[in-house]
Amino acid sequence: MPTVENPKLTLVTTNNNVEIQVSYDAKFTKLDAGLAGLGLTFHEHIDVIDDDGSSGQNTILPDLFALTSLKPDATKGAQTIHRDVSKTVSRKDLDVDTGDDEIKIRIRIHAPDMPLTFTEDVFTTSKILLGDVA
């Protein structure tokens, strides 16, 4: 299974909107690439997580980022596919409690035709959105 490395989250607030910027590297082994050449598919899953410590971690906006297929080139052997994705949402969409909102991203790669269908969860560090929504 591929691995997820170098996860990064950036939140850019403009007026009442927040741009959620995510980047990471998907590292594929030579075997992963060879299996992709034989038709195995890999899907990226990116979930927005409310990380409010005492109240736990809850997935919010689970379908914000569209399911994307990652396709390593079988002729290149081991390789890294760098991903940069972003979505803009209303600040209210991220307002899950009173006060500041702590947000992080969970990144997983899914190979639906393999027995172990998801890579281990990899999280970005949490980012704090200050204040309540008016």
Image (spheres, grey):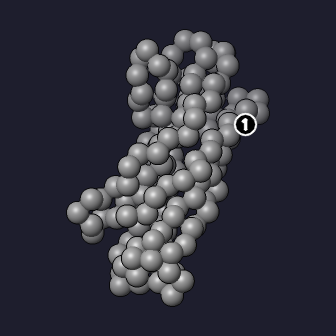
Residue 15 drawn above or below residue 118: above
Quarter of the figure with residue 90? top right
**Residue shown at 37% from the left, 59% from the top:** 110
Residue 35 drawn above or below residue 122: below
Question: Does residue 47 appear left or right of residue 128 in this picture?
Answer: left
Asked whether 22 or 64 is in front, the reply is 22
Asked whether 107 or 67 is in front, the reply is 107
Q: Mark 1 — residue?
A: 12
Q: In x, y percent, where is residue 19?
A: 68, 41
Asked whether 18 or 106 is in front, the reply is 106
Residue 67 drawn above or below residue 103: below
Q: Quadrant of the N terminus?
A: bottom left
**Residue shown at 67% from the left, 19% from the top:** 130
Q: In x, y percent, where is residue 129?
A: 65, 24
How many numbered marks, from 0 up? 1
Q: In x, y percent, where is residue 78?
A: 51, 75
Q: Callout 1: helix, strand or loop?
A: strand
**Residue shown at 47% from the left, 19% from the top:** 53
